[in-house]
Amino acid sequence: MIPEQTVHLSISIVTYYPDPVQFSVLLKNLGRALSFCSASDNTFSYCITVVDNGNQRAFLESGLDESGLLPYAGIISNSSNLGYGKAHNQAIRKIKSTFHLILNPDVILYEDSLHCALEHMQDNPVCVALSPETRGADGKYQYLCKTYPTVADLALRGFSPWPIKKHFDFRLSLYENRKLVHDRKTAPASIISGCFMFCRTEVLQKLGGFNEKFFLYFEDFALSLELGKLGRIDYVPEVKVVHFGGNAGGKGMRHICNFIKSAGIFFSLYGWKWR
C-alpha cells in the first residue's frame, strides 16, 4: 500500500526467497515495534512496502496477513531478481513519508527500536540517517559502521582464514570502527549497513535512492557517502536490532563474484585505496 497522504514512517523490505521462520519473526517483531510507536503517539502512521524479487506474492501476503500488517502493506512483485538497491528504489520513489526505513528480512527489531529512532531524528534535524546497535544471533556485536575501505581490508575481512585475521586484528578493528560500538555512545558514522538504514525520506528521494549500478553489495556504502554530503549520519546505540546476515565470503561463488564486482564499481566511483 503506497499512501496517498504523507505518513510518519514508511518501510521497505526487499525479499528473495526469505527464510520462512525468519520472515515470520521479522513481521511479528516489526508489528510490536510499530504498535509501541502508536501507543506512544496516537497520531503515528506508517506503511510497509515489500518488494518481491522472487515471485512469492502468495507467501508474502500470507505472512503479512498472519502478522496483522497486511492492511498497512503493499507488495511490488518483480518477475525476476532486480537486485537489492533497484528493488528498494521501486518503493522509495513512490512513498510519501517523513522518515523511511530500509530493512532486511533477516533483521529482528526490539520493541522500542523504531520509537528510539524516531525520537533521535526528531531531536536532531541535522541527522539524515542513523544506524543501530546490532548483534548477531549469538549475541555478539556486529560492527556495521565502517570506515572507508581499502582493497586489503576487504580481502582480509571477507576471505582470509582465521589465523591471518587474528594477526591483522588491529587493522580490522579500525576498518570495522569497533571503538564506536564499544563506547556505547551516539556518534557520527561515515558508512552504515543497508540491513537497517533509518533515513529522512526527503533526503533519500533527493538522492534518488540507491545507485542502481550495484546489483548486490556496496550499494549501502555508496548511499552512505552520498547521504553524508547532505547531513550527518549517526550511530545510535539506543536503537537495537538483531541481524542474522553477513559473511559474503561464506555464501558461495555467486555471492563472492557479486561482492568483487560491486567492490570494483565502488572504488571506481569513489577512489581506490589498496592498503
Image (cartoon, rainbow, N blue to C red):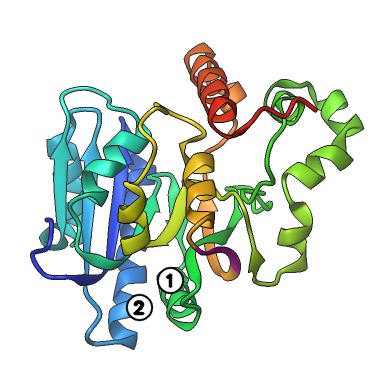
Q: Secondary structure at mark 2?
A: helix
Residue 164 left/right relative to 60: right
Sort mark 1 into few (<14), some (14-19) or many (20+) by Cα contacts within 10 Å.
many
Within the image, what quadrant is residue 16 found in? top left
How many numbered circles does the render carry?
Answer: 2
Query: Residue 188, percent across and down?
Result: 64, 64
- Front residue (pair 106, 87): 87
Is 233 magenta? The answer is yes
Which residue in the structure is indicated by mark 1?
A: 111
Decide: marks 1, 2 in contact (CB < 8 A)?
yes
Residue identifier under label 2: 36
Q: Earlier in the sequence, mark 1 or mark 2?
A: 2
Residue 24 visible: yes
- What residue sits 50% from the left and 20% below the top? 255
Instruction: Please provide percent x and percent y for residue 185.
Output: 70, 72
Is residue 262 highlighted in magenta? no
Which residue range is magenta in the image? Answer: 231-236
Is residue 219 shown left or right of residue 138? left
Residue type highlighted by circle 2: Phe
Which residue is located at x 68 percent, y 51 percent?
140
